[in-house]
Each structure stands twice: as C-alpha cells, then as structure tokens.
C-alpha cells in the first residue's frame, strides 16, 4: 500500500481492524490480579476499604460532612456543606430573604474568603460583566466552525484557544491567575451556550441564535437569555438555575475534577491548561454526567411502568433495575447514593424544593410525584438488599436533571452547566494550591511486572 495516498477514511478502517486483532492480547497483558491490590495495601481510587478518601492536602475553601465522632463512636448525620465556614443552608436562606440572585456573591466568597459588603459585591458584579466578552470573531472562527455534540469538548477546545489571545498566558503570579480566573468564570457560559447553538444549527438543522449577554443581569439570567430564542424567562426559572449554580459551585478538594485542578496546578501549568484538564475530568458519567443517567433511567421507567402511580408496579421495576435485569443492567438506581453523604445530601434537599415549585408552575406535579416515589422506593430497596455501611440518600444529581428539563435546557448542556458553576471552585483551589504548596503532586505506584529476558526480534 502506498501510505502517501492513504485517506482519513482508510485510516479509520485500518485502525478498527488493527485494534480488533490486538485487543485481546493487550487486555490479557495489562490485567492485574485483584488480590495484588490487597496484598500491597493499595488504596484503589484513593479510597480505603470503608470508602474514605486518602488525605492528600488541606483546604479552607469548603467542608463536606456526613458523620461525627460521638463518645468514641462514628455517628452518621444529615449531610452538611459549608463554603468558607458558612453552611450552604444559611447562605441560601440569606439570599432568599433578600430576594437576590446569589451566584456572584457566593463566587466572591469562594475566591476571596469573605462575604462581600454591598459596594464590594457591586464592584465584583461589574468586573464579571466587563469580562462577558470574547475576542473579535472568536465565536465565528472558533466556535461556529467546529460544531460538536459534545459541548464539553467544545468548551475545552475554546479554553485552550483563548490562551493564544492572552499575552500573559504563562504568568502564574497570583495577580494574573486571579485576572484569568475572573475571565474564565465570566466566559464559560458563553463558550457553552454558543457551542450548543452551533451544534443545534449545523448538526440538527435548527435556527442559529447568538444573543449577547446583558451586563445588567445575573449569571443565571444571562444563561437563560443567551440560550432561549426569545431570551425570555420567568423569575422562578432564573432563581432555580441560580440555586443550581450555587449548589454545584464547590464540593471540597477531593472530587475528581477539583483534585485534577490541584494536580495540574502543582506542575506549574498555566490557568488555561489547568481548566481544560478539569473540564476533561468533569465530563465523565461518573462525575459531571451523572444527572444525564438519572434522566435516561426515568425515561426508561416511564416506558416500562404502565401506571407510575401504582407503587407495587414501580417497586417491581425498580427491583429489576437493582438486579441488573432492566435499564442499563448496571444494578444502579441512579441518583440514589453518594460517596460521602449518608443520611442526606444538603444540595438535593434544597434543589428538591425548587423542583417542586417549578413543577407546580409548569403543571408537572405528576412528574414530580414520580421522582419522589422513585427516590423513596429506590432508597428503601437499596437499604433492604445492599449492605450499605453508612446509609444511602438521594444525591443532587437526582433532581438537577429534572430541574434543567423543566427549564427547557437541552441535555447536551447539563454537564456544561455544572462546569459553569464548578469553575469558581476550581479557580479558588488553584489559587490555594499556588499559595500553600510548592511541590509537584507525585503519587506512588508499585510495579508488579517482574523481570523478563530480552528476546532478539528474529527469535520472537
């Protein structure tokens, strides 16, 4: 074959044939006996046998609590989430009492470690508004010319491309990192929403809408304004999205994407590379994409349970899901359970309230009732049939997808919305890492390969 004349399509076919031949041998050589992990005291997934994360650092940014030691015994409690020492329930209640959108205020808290006064908050809102802009022709030349169903990949490409427009891209001084962080927080919604519109237009043959953000509006309002063809939304819709953004903004240093942020920061990498790495980590279905699995599961339940109000029929189907006989056959009732929380996830408790209000506004009370029944019955089945040492509860992903669907947000944007919120936490952790740590993160892996004699190629 003349390799100088091979086409892209030829390469695709050659790759498929080659990988099919090599895969079995590759898998056999790569596989490590599970017992070796136990024998070498390796904590897989950086978690011990009880599921507790291995301590690798300290943080002042947020606290996630699900248990306490009382009289020498571990007692599981309702989950608590605190930002900079303030409980999330108190922060959300304070915003509700003032009837304020809170994304910018809570972002200020995470970045600067203090709640702002009115003048500080207005100044921060103004600087966010100033940065809700992209380089000249960036939307046309970068976003619209490479539409992709995977909006997270589009965002990652855009973030790395924006580095080319920053003359101080490699400057990791705190002052410059803060400037870059504020830019990214302001720009993430534009990168995501415009990427969706590009995909929806060029791949789905729908109309193309590119609405500029309004500097007078909050982050949540601007997301809905840019996303919807007529830029309209209700007060409740905007407040529900604002709440979801705040609840997803930060969740300790141990989650996968935040840990990725700190690992890549420790190498001395620039802000754009760090955030691109965090985006790549977040997009996985085991992390930021979990609410999509909840939505798929609920659609499957509606398709196979003839009467959703018949709790016996619902129990029977949930039991089939749990026994790997239905839906995706993983044995998981998605949205039920969390790596840390045991009795309750405070984010889910808050978001459920908004789900109920939205369902009432949109006439979807029956759908909301189904979610509540799946949660209650699913948790009961798991408790009875699985050995859950710490208890099991509904997590935030169970309700976030339902909330987004009632906001008419396309499923392609579910994980990007998570990223629009979590970028604040990533940036806070990046700065904390730069201030407090000067060593590159370098975990250890123990080799179990043994030695093999070299064999000359003519004898293989």
Image (cartoon, rainbow, N blue to C red):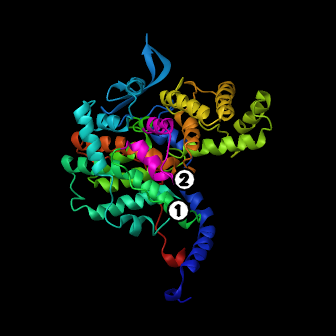
Q: Position of residue 346 (x, y in %)?
A: 48, 27
Q: Residue at x 71, y 38 (%)?
A: 321
Q: Residue at x 78, y 38 (%)?
A: 305
Q: Mark 2: which secondary structure?
A: helix
Residue picked out by circle 1: 199
Q: Quadrant of residue 145?
A: bottom left
Residue picked out by circle 2: 412
Q: Mark 1: which secondary structure?
A: helix
Indicate left or right for 336 with 101 as reference. Answer: right
Magenta-highlighted residues: 217-245
Q: Position of residue 130 (x, y in %)?
A: 27, 50
Q: Position of residue 290 (x, y in %)?
A: 55, 43
Q: Are marks 1 and 2 in contact (CB under 8 Å)?
A: yes
Quick check: is 170 in the magenta stretch? no
Q: Quadrant of the C terminus?
A: bottom right
Quick check: is 223 in the magenta stretch? yes
Label 1 Cα crowd, 10 Å radius (few <14 / some 14-19 / many 20+): many
Q: In the image shown, does 216 or 53 lie closer to the viewer?
A: 216
Mark 1 or mark 2, which has the lower sequence index? Answer: 1
Q: Position of residue 279 (x, y in %)?
A: 42, 51
Q: In this view of the protein, can residue 453 be seen by the observer? A: yes
Dominant secondary structure of the residues highlighted in magenta in the image: helix
């Amino acid at each position: 074959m003349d390799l100088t004349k091979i086409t892209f399509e030829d390469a695709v076919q050659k790759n498929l044939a080659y990988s099919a031949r090599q895969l079995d041998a590759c898998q056999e050589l790569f596989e490590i006996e599970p017992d070796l992990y136990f024998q070498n005291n390796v904590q897989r997934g950086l978690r011990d046998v009880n599921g507790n994360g291995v301590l690798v650092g300290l943080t002042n940014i947020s606290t996630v609590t699900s248990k306490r030691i009382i009289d020498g015994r571990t007692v599981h409690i309702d989950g608590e989430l605190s930002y900079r020492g303030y409980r999330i329930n108190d922060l959300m209640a304070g915003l509700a009492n003032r009837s304020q959108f809170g994304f910018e205020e809570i972002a200020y808290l995470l970045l600067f470690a203090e709640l702002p006064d009115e003048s500080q908050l207005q100044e921060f809102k103004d600087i966010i508004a100033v940065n809700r802009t992209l380089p000249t022709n960036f939307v046309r030349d970068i976003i619209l010319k490479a539409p992709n169903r995977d909006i997270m990949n589009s965002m990652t490409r855009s973030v790395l491309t924006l580095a080319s427009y920053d003359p101080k891209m490699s400057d990791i001084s705190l002052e410059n990192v803060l400037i870059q962080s504020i830019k990214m927080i302001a720009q993430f919604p534009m990168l995501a929403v415009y990427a969706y519109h590009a995909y929806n237009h060029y791949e789905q043959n729908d109309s193309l809408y590119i609405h500029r953000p309004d500097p007078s509006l909050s982050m949540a309002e601007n997301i809905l304004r840019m996303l919807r063809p007529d830029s309209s939304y209700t007060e409740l819709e905007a407040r529900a999205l604002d709440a979801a953004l705040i609840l997803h903004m930060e969740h300790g240093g141990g989650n996968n994407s935040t840990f990725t942020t700190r690992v890549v920061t420790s190498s001395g990498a620039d802000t754009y590379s760090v955030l691109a790495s965090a985006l790549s980590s977040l997009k996985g279905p085991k992390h930021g994409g979990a609410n999509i699995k909840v939505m798929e599961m609920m659609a499957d339940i509606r398709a196979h349970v003839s009467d959703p109000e018949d709790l016996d029929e619902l129990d029977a189907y949930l039991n089939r899901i749990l026994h790997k006989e239905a839906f995706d056959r993983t044995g998981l009732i998605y949205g039920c359970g969390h790596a840390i929380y045991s009795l309750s996830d405070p984010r889910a408790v808050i978001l459920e309230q908004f789900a109920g209000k939205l369902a009432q506004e949109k006439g979807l009370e029956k759908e909301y009732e189904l979610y509540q029944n799946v949660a209650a019955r699913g948790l009961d089945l798991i408790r009875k049939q699985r050995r859950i040492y710490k208890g099991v509860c509904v997590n935030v992903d169970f309700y976030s997808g339902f909330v987004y669907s009632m906001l008419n947000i396309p499923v392609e944007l579910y994980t990007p919305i998570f990223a629009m919120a979590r970028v604040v936490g990533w940036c806070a952790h990046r700065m904390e890492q730069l201030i407090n740590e000067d060593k590159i993160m370098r975990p250890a892996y123990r080799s179990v390969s043994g030695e093999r004699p070299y064999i000359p190629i003519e004898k293989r």
